[in-house]
Amino acid sequence: MNKHALLWAVILGLLTAPSLSGKTKECYDCHQDAKQTFGAYKYVHIPVKNKDCLACHDSHGFSQKLTLKAHDNSLCKKCHPKFGEGYPPSGSAYVHEPVTKGLCWSCHNPHGSDIPGLIRMVGNELVCFECHGQIKSLKKKPVQHQPFARNECSSCHVSHDSKFPHLQKEQTVKLCETCHNLSEKKYLAKHSVSGIDKIDCTTCHDPHASTLAGLIAETAHLPLVEGMCESCHANLAAGDTTLSGEAKELCTTCHDDIAAKLGMANVHVPAAEGQCLECHSGHNSKREFLLVSPPGQACLECHTEFADTLKLQGVHTALKNGKCSACHDPHGSPNASLVKDSGDNLCLGCHQEIQDTLRTATNPHPAIEERNAWNATSRTTQKRFRFLPRMRGFFACSVMIILPRKPRPIQFICHLCLGNAAHAITLMAPHARQC
């Protein structure tokens, strides 16, 4: 046998053989720092507790490289088969996103934790707040729900899947009853008008934190916050939760600014027909103006034609970001298409840099200076783009510009606020010499 081969065989035999004392070398013999860290945890993963590192890791020998037996959640499923085939169970309508992506370790520490369920900590905060930053921001509010203040998210929520929204452990009222005896006099007295069994607790209360006593939701409808439920529900004391009148009449009793818009030349159809509750919640919403869904989404539920527009390459930023109300008034306007302004300010209100340029320019574009670009276009072009509001000033110019070309003038689209299939904004550069 080659001398070098024999030498290596002896070395490897010594390294892999039991020690002279008969004891096998353990991981912790080298990884003393890990032993100290894991031993300090209140809750320790069973394989770690049993010193069974090889349940998850391969022995690395001299390579000094951490190796896992698998690099996906199949490693976890070996011991936790409930998350394997057939998961989630048919009754679970809601599944935590990290679970659907197989990212068990994004929430759980595979070695140990001071939180039940081996939940990770990031600094001094629960890992939950790494994704739920908006909830974390509520920590600054003075009135906090006790489980939230104590970082006990699991008091109300489950980590993996649930048949209830927000991964709640139970339907909202039943969940609240696990800590609050709703049949006590103090609760019955405060809800004598609304009826404690008539509405969901989170209709009035924020389950995390608020600036208002009693965790009253700051985003709730003012009559609800002030306990004036009967201003909309006159027969509530008798158990009748129906409105005491038409929504349009009830809403405009307080919202006189909206009442004024309903008398304008152009009124949004839902507003004109008194369908206030199609867009707004009568009680509470996490969104501005008590909207029942995000602004852009709310508009697209009726204005479905713009769903395809959003797929185009050149889309107006306001439309892309769901800020339809940046240009349109959702209730009423004296202008066509419910736009907020018929003059230059409709565009220049956002495009401040262009306004600054126009203010200081010594040679402004003639079409802008003329302030009547729409009327300068041919009747054929006006007819072709008749869906656009016929406005004067900068807005009209931004929609259409005339490019001279023999033997007859042609019209070329520079900007189209709603988006453009021709990618007009992109196409401006090759034609710039014609301007």
Image (spheres, rainbow, N blue to C red):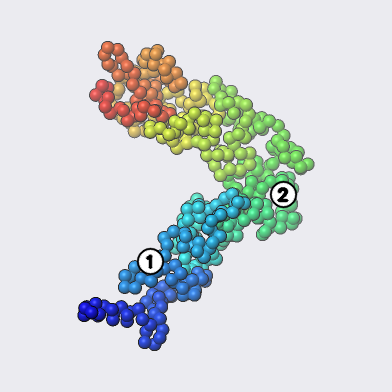
Q: As shown in the figure, which amino acid type bears the numbered disc 2?
A: Ile
Q: Position of residue 401 (x, y in %)?
A: 34, 21
Locate the N terminus and report the quarter of the image it occupies: bottom left
Q: Position of residue 67 (x, y in %)?
A: 38, 66
Which residue was labeled with disc 1?
67
Q: Is residue 49 above or below residue 353?
A: below
Q: Which mark is residue 196?
A: 2
244 displayed left or right of 111: right
Locate the C terminus and report the quarter of the image it occupies: top left
Identify the image quadrant of residue 170.
Answer: bottom right
Q: Nearer the viewer, residue 198 or 413?
A: 413
In the picture as drawn, the residue positioned furthest to the right comes out as 238
Q: As shown in the figure, which amino acid type bears the numbered disc 1?
A: Thr
Q: Is residue 92 above or below residue 319?
A: below
Residue 293 in sight here: yes
Which residue is pictured at 74% across the width and 37% down the height?
Answer: 234
Q: Position of residue 367 (x, y in %)?
A: 33, 20
Identify the image quadrant of residue 183.
Answer: bottom right
Q: Secondary structure at mark 1?
A: loop
Residue 208 in sight here: no
| Mark 2 burial class by Cα count in 10 Å: few <14, some 14-19, many 20+ | some
Q: Secondary structure at mark 2?
A: loop
376 displayed left or right of 434: right
Which residue is pictured at 52% across the width and 39% down the height?
Answer: 294
Q: Position of residue 426 (x, y in %)?
A: 32, 30
Q: Point out the tag, 2 or 1, that comes first from the N-terminus.
A: 1
Q: Nearer the viewer, residue 285 or 32?
A: 32
Q: Nearer the viewer, residue 355 or 129?
A: 129
15 displayed left or right of 250: left
Which residue is pictured at 49% across the width and 21% down the height?
Answer: 336
**Contact between labelled residues 1 and 2, with CB atoms less than 8 Å apart:** no
Which residue is pictured at 57% across the width and 50% down the height?
Answer: 94
